[in-house]
Image (cartoon, helix red, strand yellow):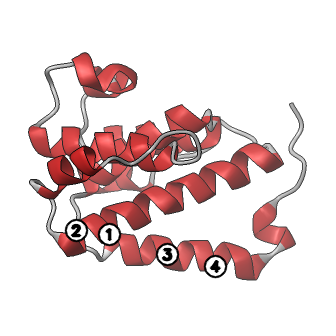
Amino acid sequence: MNQRLDYRLASPAAFQAMIHTEQQIHKSGLEESLLELVKTRASQINGCSWCLDMHTKDARARGETEQRLFLLAAWRDAPCYSPHERAALAWTDAVTQIATHEVSDALYAQVREHFDEKALVDLTLAIIAINGWNRMNVAFRTLVGDYVSPHLQRR
């Protein structure tokens, strides 16, 4: 597969807008470990190999277990996720698939048991952002495999 274009170079302003959104997400107070699970899960749904490579490497560098990463595609059946993580993953699935699936009132009520209003908006922004990154990388066929997590140096 050949990369179609490098969106970072083609439109630096668009890339910076995405980076600014990421910076806001990381200042939100949401747990970094939760963000990596959410980003990995959305990337699985969207089939974004570049983001899967990045976020699984970042999650591992931050201390996430291989088992939890391997089971993420089947998170509903895996006992290793907390109720808080399960709520975030259910919200991730629903928001990522919003074009074909309803975000139900029952799901909203379930998620609100674990996230206050601000945290839910911040979580939703994180899901929107990773879906945007997924679409950029899939559409332009960003080459995968060379990412090195900056978090490896901090451990």
As helix, strand or loop, the secondary structure at mark 1 comes to helix
**1 or 77, which lies in front?**
77
Q: Can the viewer see residue 100 in this picture?
A: yes
Task: Give above or below for 23 relative to 77.
Answer: below
| In this view, the mark in front (3 or 4) | 3
> Within 10 Å of the Cα at label 3, are there few (<14), some (14-19), or many (20+) other Cα atoms?
some
The amino acid pointed to by label 1 is Asp
> Within 10 Å of the Cα at label 2, are there few (<14), some (14-19), or many (20+) other Cα atoms?
some
The amino acid pointed to by label 4 is Gln
Residue wearing tag 2: 119
Nearer-N-terminus badge (3/1): 3
Residue wearing tag 3: 21
Residue wearing tag 4: 16
Task: Give above or below for 117 relative to 65.
Answer: below
The amino acid pointed to by label 2 is Ala
**104 or 93, which lies in front?**
104
Nearer-N-terminus badge (4/1): 4
Residue 35 horizontal/vertical position (percent): 33, 53
